[in-house]
Each structure stands twice: as C-alpha cells, then as structure tokens.
Amino acid sequence: MITISPSLLACDFLNIEKELSSFDGIKNLWYHLDIMDGHFVPNLTFGHPIIKKIGKVSKHPLDAHLMVTNPKFHVDTLVKQNIHNLTFHLETFSSQSEILELIQLAKKNYPSVGLSIKPKTTIDKTSLSEIIKNIDLLLVMSVEPGFGGQSFIEETYSRLIEIEKLKRNINPKLIIQVDGGVTDTNANKLIDHGVTNLVAGSYIFKASPQDYPKLVEKLRKGQ
C-alpha cells in the first residue's frame, strides 16, 4: 500500500494539534518533518522543542528529513523524539565511507534510515549501489530542497527509472520516496515509476482540515 507523508512545514503551526487530529484513523500515513538549519539550505525551520511536541501528540510515525550540514548532531540528539524514519542528504558527505558509517550509527536507534539526493546530484551507480544495500528508504527530491510550494521537476521520472533498476537488483524492500510538487496530477505516474511513499505539503494543507483525508486518498489512488 502506498504511504502518504504530509509535510508539516506547510501546516498551520498555531493550530498544529488540530491539524494533526485531522489525519486520525488514516492508515499508512507518516508525518514528514523538514528540518533545515539555514546552512545546507537557506531556510530555517523547526528545532527539537517543536519535534518533541509533535512526537508526543502524533498518532502516526514521524519521518525526519534532515536538510542540515551536520546530520550526525541530529542523529545523536533526536534519539528520544519518537522518530520512525531519519533521512539525511548524500551531499553533506565527502566520501562513501562517511555515509555508510553514519547509516550504521543511525540504525542503532531508528527503525528506518534513509538517504536523500537533490535533483542535480549526479547518480554514481557504483557508490549508490553500496548505499542502497544499507538503507531502508531513498528520498528522491523532485524540487530543490529548502522551500515549499515549488513546481515538480519532470526529469525526476528518468531518475526514478534508474533507481528502480537498482532497487530491483540490490534491495527489493527499499522504500522510494519522492518529495516536491507532488499532487493528484502526478501521483499516479510516480507510483507507476516505483514510488511507494509520497510527500505532499502545499497540495494537502492548502485545503480545509476536513478535506485532508480526502486529498490523502486521492494521492494514494493516483487520482
């Protein structure tokens, strides 16, 4: 079943508990947390106190997407924040060995560990193959990270074809997640390209809370 991950960056933070309660009872749903440090990307978002509060009231798994220059700091300090999946960026590392080392460290404390790649990052199939063996989730950015509401980059589909081949040959259980410009107009095509986890922010939260469940199901069905 397709997992939908509403990106809380787009929600109404002044009424966050009410926003979250709108998703009660929906299956296969994660809350996506875009954690930005103002360095890896220009924007700055919520920190540990907000994450802790969300973790206490959430009835769904938390999916932390680290857009930060020092992911190890967050791997160490988010341990008790009820995070289900923790994803950090390929671009923050200078070597494959550093990536694999942090993956193994994160796996000691998080049920799922992922890696994210930006749209313009070249895919080195050799090094990515080794990484895919060791992660649970690969997050393919379909916009440049840092800001919500951007348009979907169409070249993402060709990238997904390459990644699906690697998944099939190396780690069939790998979750492929896409984040950026996801709507009901491209969800079906993304699912057809092997995506099993769709992150959506503006598409869901631009509506009224009573409509959130309906929009989640539209994405899941690719309609």
Image: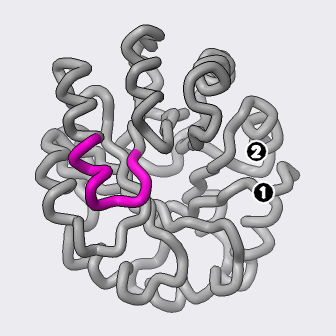
Please check the rendered image and state whether residue 108 is part of the magenta-colored stretch, yes or no: yes
Task: Answer with mark 2 or mark 1, whichever residue precedes in sequence.
Answer: 2
Q: Is residue 193 above or below residue 6?
A: above
Residue type at mark 1?
Answer: Arg
Q: Which mark is residue 97?
A: none
The answer to whether marks 2 and 1 mark residues whose Cβ atoms lie closer than 8 Å is yes
| Pointer 1 local density, CA inside 10 Å: few below 14, some 14–19, many at least 20 | many
Measuring 40% from the left and 79% from the top, which residue is drawn there? Answer: 13
Question: Which is nearer the eye, 52 or 114?
Answer: 114
Residue indicated by mark 2: 187
Would residue 149 be found to the left or right of residue 162 on screen?
left
Please check the rendered image and state whether residue 58 is part of the magenta-colored stretch, yes or no: no
Residue type at mark 2?
Answer: Ala
Q: Quadrant of residue 193?
A: top right
| Pointer 2 local density, CA inside 10 Å: few below 14, some 14–19, many at least 20 | many
Q: Is residue 208 above or below residue 83?
A: below
Residue 152 percent coordinates (x, y)? 61, 35
Residue 188 percent coordinates (x, y)? 82, 42
Question: Which is nearer the eye, 166 or 181?
Answer: 166
Q: Which segment did they paint magenta? A: 104-113
Would residue 80 be found to the left or right of residue 14 on screen?
left
Measuring 46% from the left and 89% from the top, which residue is drawn there? Answer: 17
Residue indicated by mark 1: 220
